């Protein structure tokens, strides 16, 4: 019996969120039709309005406290009660100062990562896309690199000018000194706080845009890798299979979010990848199998179940697999509806994090170690860190109560970077990062950001193993590739918003480190600031069942002169396969 519509081939519903089958304009229209306005208002209040109020209130509260203390010191202290009152005011201020500063700092960085840095990146990439579209055919590689640098500088000047105009408009309405009498008029206080926040963020943007522009314009621009070294290597070599964006689905004939029916069905392509790797490893052993994010299509339990089941069939590969989270593992709210929002207090995002930690713990929790930021050293394993929280994690997964999640938030932050230490002093180590910014909206899930704490973790690991070589692995690409993009949407909102800062911080490891990432679903081998950067194609995306895909096995080498880099890349073709219709 053959149905009129073969359900294995999918239908229009499978393309609901596909950027390959639908235009961004069409997706935006669906988003507006489906979005929950009350939920959107509450989310914007918690993510933008509250941080803005806290940021603007900080100078008013601080100045009011200083004024009160000053008045008490200046007035004659007669009796014990005024003295006790002064001590109480001092104690409250000193005790609350740290909390106030922390709240102001968190509010500032929340606004920074959600709005400020993307403004500069959008301006820079928009101008670059326009200029390269017009001039690329007329310029050589060095001239294009110079053009990108000049546009970065111009973007900073433009953003600085606009931000300065905003400051001039709102300055007269701002107020930086307050007193406790202001509490009698909350409406006026809130208005002043928002105005202060606008001025502070605009001032920061004006200065930061110039700093970012100068950094972008003066740093080496990314270039294609060029030919592989021709001379034989006399030092150690390592073979690393680099996979990314495998987007495991939870249904036998499931289609992936971005590809829809333009991609393969189910997980058959992944199974063929694992079969190929098992044969390759038998003939020429692999040292590591690195999967740089988007392991699942939406971080669902069924997807993790399918992944672990597929990998369990290959125990020799399992002991070499290393994984890190991608935006689809953490930030996708709903596979079928990009208009869905997760409220900040929702347990769903924490559940996706816990599913990742649980899956990674099962695969390589005993092998990777975490960084003790306070002690400044690489400490115990991930499994050791999770062990005291097993009951708490299971309880949260069962009931999802907010009070159970506080320590789990700290656990998640402490889990990165994960470090696979080198097997000897001059061996190869792997550093696994979480490059996903916190988002609550499926349509804006791709934003990337590497925290300063994670970069400090890299510094700590490199200092503890000073002779080691490193793979630094993350999901998002750190720089925009020096190649033409078909559409502007390919360039904005996908790379790290602080990518150039990240690259500059890693320059000290130039000659000792290689960066590996995914996210774009395409391959690119490049160099930037002395670092080799390797982008992995997706072996399961962008191609229907009958079309072949591929991935790479990289050979990394440490030469006799101590230099470390890419020796060669072996392209492994994954053949297509179409099921019979009957």
Image (cartoon, helix red, strand yellow):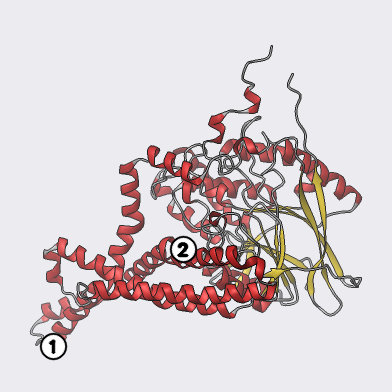
Whether residue 45 sits left or right of residue 540 in the image: it is left
Res 199 seen here: yes
Q: Secondary structure at mark 2?
A: helix
Q: Which picture quadrant has residue 193?
A: bottom left
Q: Residue 23: image x %, image y %? A: 52, 43
- Graded by Cα atoms within 10 Å as few (under 14), some (14 to 19) or many (20 or more), the crowding at tag 1 reads few
**Gap between marks 1 and 2 measured at Cα:** 48 Å
Q: Secondary structure at mark 1?
A: helix
Q: Earlier in the sequence, mark 1 or mark 2?
A: 1
User: Which residue appears at 58% of the width and 53% of the height?
Assistant: 386
Q: Quadrant of the C terminus?
A: top right
Q: Which residue is mark 2?
A: 118
Residue 479 numbered mark, or none: none
Q: Nearer the viewer, residue 316 or 573?
A: 573
User: Which residue appears at 32% of the width and 43% of the height?
Assistant: 37
Q: Which picture quadrant has residue 502?
A: bottom right
Q: Nearer the viewer, residue 220 or 565?
A: 220
Q: Are marks 1 and 2 in contact (CB under 8 Å)?
A: no
User: Which residue appears at 53% of the width and 73% of the height?
Assistant: 151
Q: Nearer the viewer, residue 69 or 303?
A: 303
Q: Which residue is mark 1?
A: 74
Q: Nearer the viewer, residue 65 or 263?
A: 263
Res 426 seen here: no
Q: Residue 395: image x %, image y %? A: 48, 42
Whether residue 227 sits left or right of residue 379 in the image: it is right
Is 501 located above or below residue 579 in the figure? below
Q: Residue 579: image x %, image y %? A: 75, 27
């Amino acid at each position: 019996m053959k149905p009129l519509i073969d359900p294995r081939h999918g239908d229009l519903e499978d393309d609901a969120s596909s950027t390959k089958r639908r235009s961004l304009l069409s997706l935006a229209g669906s988003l507006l039709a489906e979005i929950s306005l009350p939920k959107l208002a509450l989310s914007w209040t918690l993510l933008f309005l509250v941080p803005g109020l806290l940021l603007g209130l900080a100078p008013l509260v601080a100045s009011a406290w200083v004024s009160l203390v000053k008045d008490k010191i200046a007035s004659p202290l007669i009796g014990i009660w005024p003295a006790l009152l002064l001590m109480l005011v001092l104690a409250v201020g000193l005790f609350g100062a740290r909390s106030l500063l922390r709240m102001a700092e968190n509010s500032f960085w929340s606004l920074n990562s959600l709005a400020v840095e993307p403004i500069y990146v959008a301006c820079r990439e928009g101008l670059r896309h326009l200029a390269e579209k017009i001039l690329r055919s007329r310029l050589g590689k060095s001239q294009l690199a110079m053009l990108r640098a000049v546009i970065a500088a111009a973007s900073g000047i433009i953003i600085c000018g606009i931000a300065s105009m905003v400051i001039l408009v709102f300055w007269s309405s701002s107020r930086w000194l307050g007193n406790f009498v202001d509490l009698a008029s909350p409406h006026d206080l809130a208005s002043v706080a928002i105005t202060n926040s606008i001025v502070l963020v605009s001032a920061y943007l004006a200065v930061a845009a110039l700093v970012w522009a100068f950094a972008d314009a003066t740093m080496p621009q990314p270039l294609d890798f060029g030919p592989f070294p021709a001379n034989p290597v006399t030092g150690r070599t390592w073979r690393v299979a680099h996979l990314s964006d495998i987007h495991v689905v939870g249904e036998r004939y499931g289609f992936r979010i971005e590809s829809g029916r333009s991609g393969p069905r189910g997980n058959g392509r992944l199974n063929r990848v694992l079969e190929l790797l098992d044969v390759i490893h038998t003939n020429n052993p692999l040292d590591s199998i690195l999967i740089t994010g988007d392991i699942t299509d939406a971080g669902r339990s069924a997807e993790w179940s399918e992944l672990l089941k597929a990998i369990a069939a290959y125990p020799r590969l399992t002991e070499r697999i290393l994984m890190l989270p991608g935006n689809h593992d953490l930030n996708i709210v709903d596979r079928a509806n990009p208009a869905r929002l997760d409220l900040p207090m929702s347990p769903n995002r924490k559940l996706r994090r816990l599913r990742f930690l649980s899956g990674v713990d099962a695969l390589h929790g005993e092998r990777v170690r975490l960084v003790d930021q306070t002690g400044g050293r690489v400490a115990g394993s991930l499994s050791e860190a999770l062990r005291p929280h097993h009951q708490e994690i299971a309880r949260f997964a069962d009931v999802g109560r907010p009070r159970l999640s506080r320590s789990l938030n700290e656990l998640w932050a402490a889990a990165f970077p994960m470090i696979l230490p080198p097997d000897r002093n001059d061996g190869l180590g792997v550093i696994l990062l979480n490059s996903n910014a916190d988002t609550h909206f499926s349509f804006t899930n791709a934003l990337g950001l590497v925290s300063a704490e994670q970069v400090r973790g890299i510094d700590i690991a490199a200092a503890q193993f000073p002779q080691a070589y490193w793979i630094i692995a993350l999901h998002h690409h750190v720089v925009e590739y020096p190649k033409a993009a078909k559409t502007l949407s390919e360039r904005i909102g996908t790379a790290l918003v602080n990518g150039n800062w990240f690259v500059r911080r890693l320059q000290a490891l130039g000659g000792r480190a290689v960066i590996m990432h995914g996210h774009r679903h395409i391959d690119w081998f490049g160099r930037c600031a002395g670092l080799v950067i390797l982008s992995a194609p997706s072996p399961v995306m962008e191609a229907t069942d009958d079309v072949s895909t591929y991935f790479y096995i990289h050979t990394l080498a440490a030469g006799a002169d101590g230099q470390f880099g890419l020796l060669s890349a072996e392209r492994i073709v994954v053949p297509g396969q179409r099921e019979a219709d009957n």
